[in-house]
Amino acid sequence: MISERTRQTIRRWDDGLARVEGHAVTLLMLALIGVAACQALWFNLAERGVSWAARALQASAWADPFLHEGTLCVAFLGASLATHADRHFAIDLATRVAPERVARGMLRAGALGAALVSFALCAVFFEASLASDASVPFEYERLTVGGRQHVCDAARAADAAPLGLCGLRAALAWAGVPVSTFGGAAQLVVPLALSIIGLRLLARAAGLLALARDRSRSGDGAVRNAQTEVAS
């Protein structure tokens, strides 16, 4: 039997993780809006013959991949936040009309099934992310005496200062996750978010996190208490 103290600890950790996810989504959204706005401005100015805007547009070849991968990250982080708040898409007609005990059993069974699906999708997306980033793109290769090498391997062999990608690549390689590009590293947000979604659903099925029925009850109770205080 799990103690109430353990449940409260898990809920605090879940709330803290949700705050981190919320800050990450906010910062990423601001970055996406800023990059897209600058890219549109530079394009319009370049069309009118502004030379510095044309150079800036040419130098921002990374913007399109960043917008693509950033949108993907925002979508799955938002899905994880929706799971935290228990506001994801659900067909809850049966649980609304069913008796209390039956409805709670249905909600927990549904959470367990959804958790298993999330873990399965996590494994599939993880393998797909590694497979899509297995080959090294041409712009990330360097021709050395020993043949073609990744830019980070070539920089290490020449004792050059490591790039930001090289530090991230080394950290993920230490964890047993090989990546070649920033895009490949960004795609790992998808299986990470799916694993968090699965853990939250599994905790909800085990009774460690509140079900939607419990959340609505506590919300209704708070509203009734506030109305009583105002009336008095």
Image: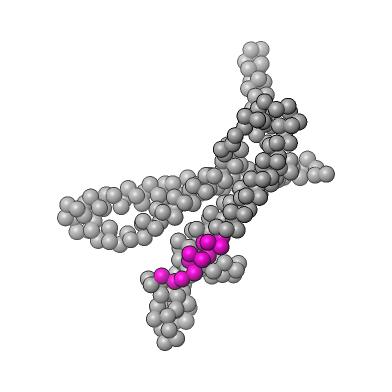
Which picture quadrant has residue 172?
A: bottom right
Q: Residue at x 65, y 34 (%)?
A: 212
Q: Indicate yes or no whether the magenta region holds residue 150.
A: no
Can see residue 176?
Answer: yes
Q: Residue at x 41, y 50 (%)?
A: 31
Question: Residue 86, relative to residue 31: is it above or below?
Answer: above
Q: Indicate yes or no whether the magenta region holds residue 131.
A: yes
The location of residue 75, given as percent across then percent down, is 49, 47
Q: Residue at x 65, y 30 (%)?
A: 94
Question: Residue 218, relative to residue 192: is it above or below?
Answer: above
Left or right of 164 in this view: 100: right
The location of residue 137, given as percent across then percent down, is 41, 70
Q: Which region of the structure is painted magenta?
A: 126-137
Most foreground residue, 176 or 229: 176
Q: Which residue is at the far left?
A: 49
Quadrant where the C terminus lies?
top right
Most foreground residue, 47 or 9: 47
The location of residue 209, given as percent across then percent down, is 69, 41
Q: Residue at x 57, y 51 (%)?
A: 193
Quadrant where the N terminus lies?
top right
Left or right of 153 in this view: 192: right
The location of residue 51, given as percent across then percent down, is 19, 59
Q: Which residue is at the far right?
A: 1
